[in-house]
Image: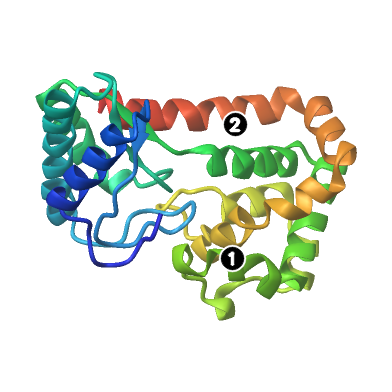
Amino acid sequence: MDKTDVPQTPQDLFLILAAVADEGIRVQTIAPKFSGRFNKGVDYVGNVEAFRREFEADVLAVQTAIRVFGLPPDLKLSVHSGSDKYSIYAAIRETIVKHGVGLHLKTAGTTWLEELAGLAAAGGDGLALAKEICVTALGRLDELCTPYATVIDIRRSNLPTTAMVNGWTSAQFVAALRHDTHSPAYNPDLRQMLHVGYKVAAELGDQYLVLLRQRADVVGVMVSANVARHLKAVFAG
């Protein structure tokens, strides 16, 4: 999904859906472009009212395409890279309630970040592994960031040094990573870097997965709280 500042028009979306119908594709979700920035794991950057107008226009385009082309009635918009975009959730919620439609919101990336924060919060070998992942990601910054260049805005000067990370307590690591804009320790640049740094954890294989299971009492609470926070913001307000 190309997150440029040029949104996809509802007319373009309608034509795309016409082509989908012609091909007989049983599509369930479609992710149009919206204006503004949808950077990984951090809040939306852009004009919220412009997004609201674009989102509602796209909802109407999808609903019209369902009626005209006989597309699946549960076809819904997908807000790709939509995790942690709290400033636009009210606009999304009001629109889907108004028109009685569903929504696909992609949040998988923040689950990984909450796992990492949970390991750090658990202390001991959990904190040690979280630091190892972070330090490794810092050393492989170009490799990890290049594939995601259009959906991250990282100020490298704001990233911690290896020495800083190695000196962090559990509380300091969690405060820097977790998306709490009221905390002076929150570091959105670190958060974006670690969001695209999942490859480091994946390369650890069982070492990472076993520790997640061993620290499930802490990690599970943080992951569940993050999912609940998104569900409440989008669907309950």
User: Residue at 38% across / 60% down in the picture?
Assistant: 2
Label 1 CA crowd tier, 10 Å (few <14, some 14–19, many 20+)? few
Disc 2 or disc 1, which is closer to the eye?
1
Left or right side of 50 for 2: right
Rounded to the nearest angstrom, the CA distance separating label 2 from label 1 is 28 Å
Of the numbered discs 2 and 1, the one sitting upstream in the chain is: 1
Screen quadrant of the N terminus: bottom left
User: Residue at 65% across / 54% down in the picture?
Assistant: 172
Q: Secondary structure at mark 1?
A: helix
Q: Position of residue 46 (x, y in %)?
A: 24, 62
Q: Secondary structure at mark 2?
A: helix
**Vertical position of residue 120 compared to residue 1: above or below:** above
User: Residue at 80% across / 26% down in the picture?
Assistant: 213
Q: Identify which amino acid the numbered label 1 is placed on.
A: Pro
Would residue 111 be seen by someone viewing this image from the given angle?
yes
Q: Position of residue 40 (x, y in %)?
A: 48, 55
Which residue is disc 1 drawn over?
Answer: 147
Which residue is disc 2 drawn over?
Answer: 222
Q: Residue furthest bottom?
A: 157
User: Residue at 31% across / 37% down in the picture?
Assistant: 20
Would residue 130 be seen by someone viewing this image from the given angle?
no
Q: Position of residue 131 (x, y in %)?
A: 78, 56
